Amino acid sequence: MAETISVQQSRELDQKTINEVGIPSLVLMERAALKIYGDLLANDELDLTKVLVLVGSGNNGGDALDVARLLETHGFDTSVLLIGKPQSRSEQMERQLQICDYYQVKHVFLDEDFGQYTTIVDGLFGSGLARAVEGDFATAIDKANQSGVKIHAIDIPSGLNGDSGEVMGTAVKATSTSTLAYAKTGMVLSQAKPYTGKIFVDDIGIYLHDHYEE
């Protein structure tokens, strides 16, 4: 596999691209969502007839909502399940939620029967998760894993440590993963394989080395 980066490098590259290069975070989010949507369509293992999107309160959740909107506006039956406290939501996640609500994407709740869906999209946590998953997040992950439905993860399967590849209490067992810019170091380790499935590496305009320096 191509070059991998650490969680810290990922965070620094995001900030450099936004603050130094000057590409707004919402533009990066839209690029990411278009790539993830393309991965979903390209993956023959996934049936997009009825899709459940699990949404966390950070920017990973913003990506997930962006993907949900793309699915819904392209004719796929899509529902979103929001996990986490409203006061914890990032600005970008809130913006994407407003857009989803404009397009009337359906909301469901944690008591939903996950087994009725044909694909689950995991957008609960990004690669920066630093502590064990608990509460409603753990419940949602366990329900997804137990549903028998194939799961596509955004950036990294929720609950997986991006540096070590270790499970942080519980983790999504994805059929496939769209990782943004570069795979994270922990994702390519042997213990992570049962959780990542097939990895798509999506170029969204974030680069480890500036092209003019190469």
Image (cartoon, grey):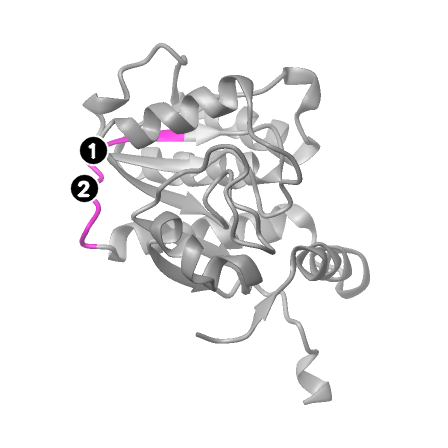
Mark 2 residue element = loop
Q: Is residue 48 magenta?
A: yes
Cα–Cα span, label 1 and label 2: 6 Å
> What is the span of residues highlighted in magenta in the rendered image?
44-53
**Residue 68 position (above or below residue 213):** above
Q: Which residue is mark 1?
A: 118
Left-right relation of 79 to 96:
left
The quadrant of the image that shows the C terminus is: bottom right
Q: Quadrant of residue 118?
A: top left
Mark 1 in CB contact with mark 2 (< 8 angstroms):
yes
Q: Residue furthest top?
A: 111
Q: Which residue is mark 2?
A: 47
Point 63% across, 45% down: residue: 26
Amino acid type at circle 2 is Asp
Q: Which mark is residue 83?
A: none
Q: Residue furthest right?
A: 20
The image shows residue 128 at horizontal and vertical percentages of 64, 45
Point 41% across, 61% down: residue: 190
Left-right relation of 172 to 28:
left
**Residue 51 position (above or below residue 192):** above
Point 39% across, 61% down: residue: 200
**Residue 71 position (above or below residue 108):** below
The image shows residue 152 at horizontal and vertical percentages of 35, 44
The image shows residue 206 at horizontal and vertical percentages of 63, 65
The image shows residue 110 at horizontal and vertical percentages of 40, 14
Mark 1 residue element = loop
